[in-house]
Amino acid sequence: RALVEAGKEAELRSLQAQAGVTSARAALDAARTARASAFARLTALAGSPAPFTALAESLLPRPTPENLERTIDALSVPAVVAAQAEREAAARRVRVERTRAIPDVTVSAGVRRFSGDDSSAVVAGVSVPIPVFDQNRGNVNAAQGELLAAEARLNAARLDAEAELRTALFQVEAAQTRVAAAVQTEATAAEAYRLTRIAYEAGKSPLVELTNARRALAEARTQTIEAQ
């Protein structure tokens, strides 16, 4: 009876192992698909004519610099740069419209002949328009309105960028905490697996304990990778 029970348990664990292999293969296929999608996005963002298929070095174990906040400038965010360019263009339009309010002086010159005494004379004139009623105020006011709107958009973009930067820094700090905890958990699982394997090889521990310890180590390593 004990042998029958042991055989059933071995068959059950074999089925569980096969299910685990099938699940691992499915996860591997999903990871490969995600990897190909990530490289496609990287190629598009970089504007590279040749598609990226690999990285020169792993990005996971790279430590985060202590002065991360100092190395990131909120004013360099594309949205802020675009808003700054719009504000400068609006300011230039204001200057252009103000210069158009200045009257243009027109000078004319020519020669006029008199048929009575067959003589000629040089004729010159100066034309100065006097903008009494307009002075291009409408266009100037419109340009100033565009400038105020552009400045408001620039301030909003700056505030959004600063808020997103602070949020990102908090996320980085939380991620570093998760990584540290995951690494510690993995180290503990690795030591537990090492001791269990020694006990199993010495005949002091059953195979199921070794299998469970190996599974715990694999899960701990997966958590570390996800955290990184």
Image: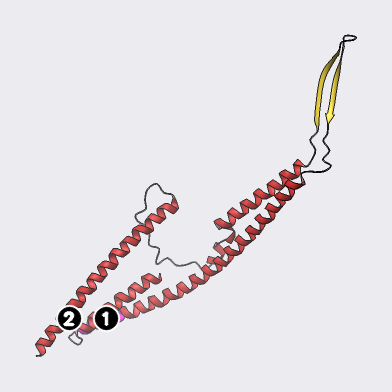
Q: Is residue 69 magenta?
A: no
Which amino acid, by three-letter code, is at mark 1? Ala
Vertical comparison of 79 with 25: above or below: above
Kindly identify which residue carries mark 2. Answer: 12
Question: Bounds of the magenta span?
Answer: 190-204
Q: 46 or 93: which is nearer to us?
A: 93
Q: Position of residue 201 (x, y in %)?
A: 19, 82
Quarter containing the N terminus: bottom left
Q: Are marks 2 and 1 in contact (CB under 8 Å)?
A: no
The dot on residue 213 is 1
Q: 61 or 228: which is nearer to us?
A: 228
Of badges 2 and 1, nearer the viewer stands 2
Quarter containing the C terminus: bottom left
Q: 223 or 152: which is nearer to us?
A: 152
Q: Position of residue 147 (x, y in %)?
A: 68, 53
Q: Residue furthest bottom?
A: 1
> Quick one: SS at disc 2?
helix
